[in-house]
Structure formats: C-alpha cells, structure tokens
Image (tube, rainbow, N blue to C red):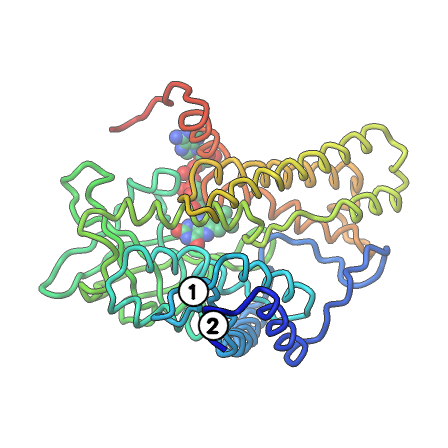
C-alpha cells in the first residue's frame, strides 16, 4: 500500500496490530489506596545504572517502532519520516498510550527540541547524519544552553567558539544539562563575536558529546537523583558543517529550541503530567481531611485551574498544528501548568502535615516529598515563571517593557 494514500482507519489498524504484537495492554492506573507504586516525583530520581537500563530498553523499543513506520510519522521521507498529517501522529499517541511500553523520557529533549532545530537550521550533512538516528533511538541529544552566569539572560553566555579553518574550537562551561550523561550529541550555543551586541554574537552548533575535550560531571539535586550535569569544553573541535544557521545568528536558533521547549513542557511532555484529581481526593479522605472546607476549596482550585490549563494548552497546540510557530501562548501554557503544580504541592503539604517530612513507611504519604521538592524546578526549567510573566505582559498584554540592565 502506498503510504501517501493510507487512510486514518487503515493507519489505526496498522498501529494497533503492531502494538498488540509487540507490547502488553496497559493496566488501568489504580487510584485505590495502597495499590501499586506510590511514586509521584516530577524529576527522574534514578541511579546511574537504572538510567542506563532505561536508555537501553528505550533504544530497543524506539528502533522497533521506527522500523515499523511509527517513529517519525509526520517527518520528511528523505530523513526517514512518513510525511503523514499530524492527525496520524495523534492516532499513534492515543493507541500507544493504551499499551505498556518502555519509557521514552531520555529521548524527550532530543526529539522535542533539538531535532526540530536541526530540521530548521542544520546543513544537509547534519540532517542526513543525525535525524534518522535520533528518531530511531540510535542516538540521544541534549541541550547545552545554560551557563553558570547565563540562564534567564541566555544571550549573556560566555562560552567561546573560535574559527580555525574548516573547524571551530569550543571552550567554556555549560550547566544544568539534562541527560548529558547518556547523550551522543548536543545542541550548543557559543559566543563567536565578543565585540557584537550580546544577541548578535552567538552561533549554534551540533557537538559530538564523545569528542576529546568534552567532560560531563553529574550534579545531584535535592530530590536525590542526578539528572543534570555540568559540561566542560576544552579545545573541542567541531566541523563548520555542524554549524546551525549562519555565523552570529545563534539567537534565532536558540529561540526555535526554546519555543519548542515551552511547547513540550506546557504540553505535559516534560515529565510533569498533572496528577489526577482522584488521587488527591483519595489522599484527603485517607488523612480524614475531606470535610475540611479549606482542603475542599484548594482541591476545587486545582481542578478548575487544571482544566483551564489543559484548554489553554490545547488552544496553543491547535495553532501550532495549523502551521503557526510556537508563540507567547506557549509561555501561558507553561505558566498555567507550573502554577497548578505549585497548588498541588501546597495542597499535599496542607493535607499531609508532618507525614510529608517523616517517613513512617506509610503508603502514599512521604512519597509526596519527592513531588514537593521537585516542583520548584518546573518553575525554572524552560523559562522561569518571572521571565514568562514578562513575556506575557509585554507581548500578549502590550504592557510597557520591563527595565533592562543592558541593551
Ligand atoms: C529541571 C530543569 C532542567 C533543565 N535542563 C536544562 C538543559 O537541559 N539544558 C540547559 O541548557 N539548561 C537547563 N536548565 C537550566 C534552565 O534553563 C535555567 O535554570 C533557567 O533558564 C534559569 O536560569 P538560572 O538558573 O541561571 O537562573 P537566573 O536566570 O539566575 O534567575 C534567578 C532568579 O532571578 C529571576 N530573574 C532573572 N531575570 C529576571 C528578569 N529579567 N525579570 C524578573 N526576574 C528575573 C528568575 O526568575 C529567578 O527567579 C534546566 C533547569 C531545570 C530546573
């Protein structure tokens, strides 16, 4: 059958046949107290060995999915995609959600943010070399933007790339690089003209994370895991054809990635899916707080705001699906999500009291500590709440611009 003429119905049948042959149906997540895992963390809290096992299983699964034609449903055929409309991707997502499949979390940043940037800004060589491998799960990509003195003020970054013939030589330090410990390539933004105004002197590259001079050092977070890293670059050589976009046009490249990042996090793809209301109600019942008007009001706020956040996100995603670039709506979507995560955090703290900080071995109580400690990170990753409010104020509401310390 020609792929171009496959109907949605035929595609769904094909997807279900593949899933039934390769995975087990997912058991309904139980909301019954004491049943199943009580894990509610927001960041990956795994040992290095557990992470590597997750990566290994994920790679095997993604390879199988890609070879069966479901790895890059909407992508261009020259890089291994099927060029089908986004509605087919949604069918795949809906069908595969009914099955218990290996975690694809390690591939999230690479496919959600780096791959769209490569597609938009890389040379043909780089697209040919990496896109198919990324979607097939053969390689993983990370995002090397933040530096110790450049996070919100990303354009102030100081890592240097200096041209040397057909190559660039990279020196500097990145920080908070999620997944660098198992990544094969990274999208990096470096300063190529220190004399130009800060937004005008940056250039993007795709860097080989296994190249000599790349040193990845894990950072342990307060929740226990170590999903971030510091990455040091010492005389790392990058071929000029691994440049993303034009020299000194790296800010445009970075914006492509950041907008896709907000879309991924706001869309719940950042590992921060909103906790089901039923679980929160059950918690209040078990703690004997379900008649407490303050608790009930907090619960109602979470439900109402969670619903509004979902609709805001759907509206923003619909715009993207209609062909528009991710815009300030994604900032609103991400802000709505993180606001609600904070409400959930406050709610469980109110309901659990001391049980949140003292592990008495009781199911579904102390486990929330991981959520409460991980939640502030969600208000920082992909643009802090304050920065997103500035964007909404200035670009959506048309308010006067915030004072800038530099131009
Ligand atoms: C879970 C997580 C994953 C991450 N993964 C990655 C990754 O893979 N790759 C990567 O490159 N980075 C990553 N980061 C880093 C992230 O992008 C930065 O932490 C973020 O951009 C904020 O930068 P900063 O930490 O330097 O804080 P700062 O920019 O120093 O901000 C400190 C405080 O000042 C406030 N502030 C700063 N400027 C303004 C302003 N103009 N107006 C009002 N308030 C302001 C901020 O809101 C914040 O409260 C990750 C971070 C987290 C938490």
Q: Height in image: 240 above or below 389? A: below
- Picture disc at residue 83: 1
Q: Is residue 198 left or right of residue 146?
A: left
- Neighbor class of circle 1 (other Cα within 10 Å; few <14, some 14-19, many 20+) is some
Q: Nearer the viewer, residue 108 or 99?
A: 99
Residue 208 place in picture, x, y as percent: 31, 68
Looking at the rendering, in which quadrant would you find the C terminus? top left
Which picture quadrant has residue 164?
bottom left
Question: Residue at the spot x=44%, y=36% of the render?
Answer: 328
Q: Is residue 262 left or right of residue 245?
A: right
- Neighbor class of circle 2 (other Cα within 10 Å; few <14, some 14-19, many 20+) is few
Which circle, 1 or 2, is nearer the viewer? 2
Question: Residue at the spot x=58%, y=40% of the render?
Answer: 338
Residue 176 in view: no
Q: Earlier in the sequence, mark 1 or mark 2?
A: 2
Residue 242 in view: yes
Query: Decide: marks 1, 2 in contact (CB < 8 A)?
Result: yes
Q: Height in image: 286 above or below 386? A: below
**Cα distance in 3D space between marks 1 and 2:** 9 Å
User: As drawn, which residue projects farthest toward the left?
Assistant: 165
Q: Nearer the viewer, residue 230 or 94?
A: 94
- Label 2: element kind: helix
Circle 2 is placed at which residue position? 3
Q: Is residue 268 left or right of residue 126?
A: right
Q: Nearer the viewer, residue 230 or 62?
A: 62
Residue 372 place in picture, x, y as percent: 66, 45
């Amino acid at each position: 059958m020609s792929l171009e003429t496959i109907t949605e119905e035929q595609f769904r049948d094909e997807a279900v046949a593949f899933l039934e042959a390769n995975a087990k149906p997912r058991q309904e997540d139980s909301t019954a107290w004491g049943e199943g895992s009580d894990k509610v963390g927001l960041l990956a809290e795994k040992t290095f060995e557990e992470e590597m096992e997750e990566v290994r299983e994920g790679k095997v699964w993604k390879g199988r999915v890609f070879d069966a034609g479901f790895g890059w449903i909407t992508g261009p055929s020259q890089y291994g995609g099927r060029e089908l409309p986004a509605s087919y991707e949604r069918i795949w997502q809906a069908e595969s959600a009914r099955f218990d499949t290996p975690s694809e979390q390690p591939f999230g940043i690479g496919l959600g943010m780096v791959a769209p940037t490569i597609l938009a800004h890389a040379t043909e060589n780089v697209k040919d070399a990496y896109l198919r491998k990324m979607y097939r799960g053969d390689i993983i990509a990370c995002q090397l933007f933040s530096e110790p003195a450049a996070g919100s003020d990303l354009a102030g970054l100081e890592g240097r790339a200096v041209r040397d013939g057909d190559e660039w030589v990279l020196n500097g330090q990145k920080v908070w690089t999620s997944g660098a410990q198992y990544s094969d390539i990274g999208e990096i933004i470096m300063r190529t003209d220190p004399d130009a105004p800060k937004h005008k002197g940056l250039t993007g590259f795709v860097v080989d994370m296994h190249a000599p001079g790349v040193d990845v050092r894990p950072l342990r977070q307060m929740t226990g895991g170590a999903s971030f890293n510091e990455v040091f670059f010492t005389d790392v050589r990058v071929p000029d054809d691994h440049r993303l976009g034009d020299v000194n046009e790296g800010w445009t490249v970075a914006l492509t990635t950041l907008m896709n990042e907000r879309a991924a996090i706001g869309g719940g793809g950042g590992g921060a899916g909103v906790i089901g209301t039923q679980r929160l109600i059950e918690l209040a019942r078990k703690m004997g707080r379900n008649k407490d008007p303050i608790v009930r009001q907090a619960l109602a706020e979470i439900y109402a705001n969670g619903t509004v956040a979902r609709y805001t996100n759907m509206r923003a995603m619909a715009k993207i699906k209609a062909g528009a670039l991710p815009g300030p709506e994604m900032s609103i979507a991400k802000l709505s999500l993180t606001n609600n995560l904070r409400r959930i955090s406050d709610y469980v703290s109110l309901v659990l009291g001391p049980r949140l900080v003292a592990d008495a071995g009781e199911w579904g109580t102390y486990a929330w500590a991981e959520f409460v400690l991980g939640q502030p990170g969600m208000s920082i990753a992909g643009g802090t709440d304050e920065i997103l409010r500035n964007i909404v104020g200035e670009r959506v509401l048309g308010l006067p611009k915030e004072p800038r310390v530099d131009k």
